[in-house]
Amino acid sequence: MRRELIVVTALAAGSQISAFFKLWFTARIFGLSAELDGYNLALIIPTTLSGIFAGCLQTGLFPVRANLNAKGDRSDVDAFERTLLLSVGAAGCIAATLLFFSNALVITHLSPRVLAPAVQHSLHIVAPSVSVLVALSMFGDTAGYILAMRRRFAVAAAAPIINGIIGGLVLASFPQAGLSSLLAGTIVGTVCQVGICVWGLHRSGLRLFGSVLPIVRARVLFCQIVTLSAWIFPGVLLSNLAVSLPAVWVSGFGEGANSAFGYAYRLHSSTVQLLVMAGSPVILANFSDLIAGGEIQAVRSILLKAAAIALIIGAAGMILVGTIGPSLLTYIFRGKFDADAAIRVSNHWWWMSTGIAFLIIGNVFAKLWQSQQRPKFMTLMAIISIITMIGSHHLLMPYLGEYGVAAAMSVAASATVVVGVPFLGLNSANRHDSNKHERRRR
């Protein structure tokens, strides 16, 4: 596990560098602008839909595929994975088409009335085109999970590197195109990322076109995935809403507010991606093996190490962002990204950093519950998170203004960890495991 985590983390660092490459050009060209506000808002619905799908699929897919693989029939596993990919591809195309034709209605009824006309104009331009990202993300996430289950973690982790590089190069090559260049870079980069995953599957021995499962057999396995995912669906839905709502809330603070929040969130989420999310398939796969083998002490040891590391990282992040954040951002981005923009972004970033330790620990908890096939606890934590965030937002906004949104996110992250500790289930699992071995000795 350690070697896999090192490799995946190194590649994740590369993907974050490539993402920063694109962010650098975005900041220099757009700064804090209405155009970028509209672009960020247009991405909310596609990313929310694909995020809900990915979270549900991950919960149901890993245990079902693991059980199928344990039977030792390689051709059956290949047929299952191929059937899943083709089914997800078709479902993604249908979802993207429906979103494309419904975007005008969605924008009209769901976009905040407080948005400036320039932001609304940008939103109308971008929203129809980004519908295709739903289909690409659904297929790409599925391919990435299959790569993880085939122990090809490196390919799945390396694919986003191409995405960031392509997006940055398109924006750098055609800066005069502005919003069109940013949009084209996002779509083309995502296509290339999915292509890398497909190539990785081919290299691992899985071809997209070949024998598939009979309809009856596929329906049984897919129903198992859906059944497991059903427990987590409310939690995934609420978790993705918890990510989407802050971007909508902060838009009410005028032009540039969403852009400032967006830069800070990208910097913040890149840190989380590098530290936890990139390695989550590795953590989930190993947690699943340890839980299946009854090695509860090893699971407990991983949790304790993760908590200690997360607290150290959280403290360091708060200190660094609070002391050198504004000057560092001003020096790096420049262009239309001036000193005032740097201060505004760093303030959002610092408040997000106050909860990064809890966010890391919470993600590790989620992998444990998934491996234990206890997704209902993830739903419970999501409910607690969104309720806490909404309440904190209303309480903090009069005192912190637009920065109250980021602060509310951190409060929600801490609440889920505090409430989640008693539900880890390791003590009861350990007693059950001990009783099982005692009966065997008898």
Image (spheres, grey):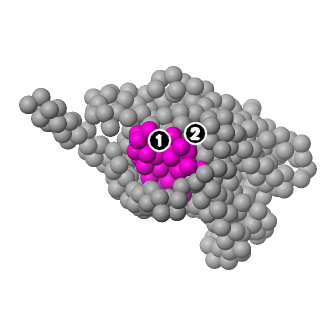
Q: Nearer the viewer, residue 99 or 288?
A: 288
Q: Is residue 131 above or below residue 25?
A: below
Q: Judging from the image, what secondary structure is the residue with disc 1 in? A: loop
Residue at position x 51%, y 46% in the image: 76
Residue annotated with mark 2: 147
Q: Secondary structure at mark 2?
A: helix
Residues in magenta? 53-82
**Residue 132 percent location from the top left of the image:** 72, 60
Residue at the spot x=31%, y=48% of the render? Answer: 419
Left or right, 359 with respect to 349, comes to: left
Q: Residue 73's mark? A: 1
28 falls in the magenta region: no
- Indicate which disc residue 432 carries: none
Q: Is residue 381 left or right of residue 115?
A: left
Residue 379 visible somewhere in the drawing: no
Residue farthest along the left direction in this orientation: 442
Expressed as whole percent of the image width and height from the top left, the position of residue 283 reads: 45, 35
172 over 221 or under it: above or below: above
Q: Quadrant of residue 157?
A: top right
Image quadrant where residue 395 sits: bottom left
The amino acid on which the numbered mark 1 sits, given as a three-letter code, is: Asp
